[in-house]
């Protein structure tokens, strides 16, 4: 069903980025300053785990807030070196798309757009926390969204997005 504007004409699909912002940010180095010595003295390599999530909230008037959550945990053995978290958000105007295209925009396109900003915040937090630079590798949100849709179609339970 096509959107109809005040002149009675079918509306064109529109995607408008209105705002990108950091909604929440946190950095913890619970074992500092001792962990800095341990990193330099051990042959053990730090292990890094990324947890990824996203949430979309309808704001009304074809506006949506999409929040991309990244949690990066670095451990050395059993000890946490650091924990960096960011919730990168954007407000998007989305109208005139089919239901499937609309869902794809919210579930894939918007997180793809937010990710470079979140990656920069994480990188800055890690460096300012006194640790070696860490650059997150690109994430294929199209593939994650396709997998999520496949699981829904198959009736599988959808786990939280983890990478």
Image (spheres, rainbow, N blue to C red):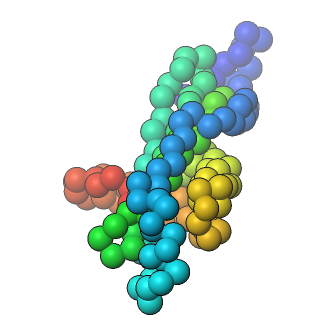
From this viewpoint, which residue is outermost toward the bottom?
A: 43
Tell me where residue 44 sits by quadrant: bottom left
Tell me where residue 66 sits by quadrant: top right
Residue found 45% across the figure and 39% down from its top:
55
Whole-percent x, y for residue 48 in the image:
45, 70
Towards the viewer: 30 or 37: 37
Residue found 65% across the figure and 55% down from its top:
128
Q: On screen, 91 above or below 107?
A: above
Q: On screen, 120 above or below 107?
A: below
Residue found 72% across the figure and 29% down from its top:
18
Whole-percent x, y for residue 43 in the image:
44, 89
Residue found 39% across the figure and 69% down from its top:
75
Towards the viewer: 148 or 46: 46
Whole-percent x, y for residue 129 in the image:
59, 56
Towards the viewer: 22 or 19: 22
* Residue 45 in sight from this viewpoint: yes
From this viewpoint, which residue is outermost toward the right?
A: 7
69 to the left or right of 18 = left
Q: Quadrant of the N terminus?
A: top right
Whole-percent x, y for residue 131 in the image:
59, 66
* Residue 2 in sight from this viewpoint: no
119 to the left or right of 28 = right
């Amino acid at each position: 069903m096509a959107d109809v504007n005040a002149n009675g004409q079918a509306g064109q699909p529109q995607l408008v980025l209105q705002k990108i912002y950091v909604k929440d940010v946190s950095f913890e180095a619970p074992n500092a300053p001792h962990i800095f010595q341990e990193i330099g003295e051990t042959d053990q390599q730090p292990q890094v785990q990324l947890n990824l999530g996203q949430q979309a909230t309808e704001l009304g008037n074809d506006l949506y807030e999409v929040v991309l959550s990244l949690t990066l945990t670095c451990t050395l053995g059993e000890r946490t070196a650091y924990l960096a978290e960011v919730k990168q958000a954007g407000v998007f105007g989305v109208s005139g798309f089919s239901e499937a295209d609309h869902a794809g925009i919210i579930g894939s396109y918007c997180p793809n757009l937010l990710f470079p900003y979140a990656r920069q915040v994480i990188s800055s937090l890690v460096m300012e926390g006194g640790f070696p630079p860490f650059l997150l590798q690109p994430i294929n949100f199209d593939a994650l969204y396709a997998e999520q849709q496949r699981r829904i179609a198959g009736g599988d339970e959808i786990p939280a997005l983890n990478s």
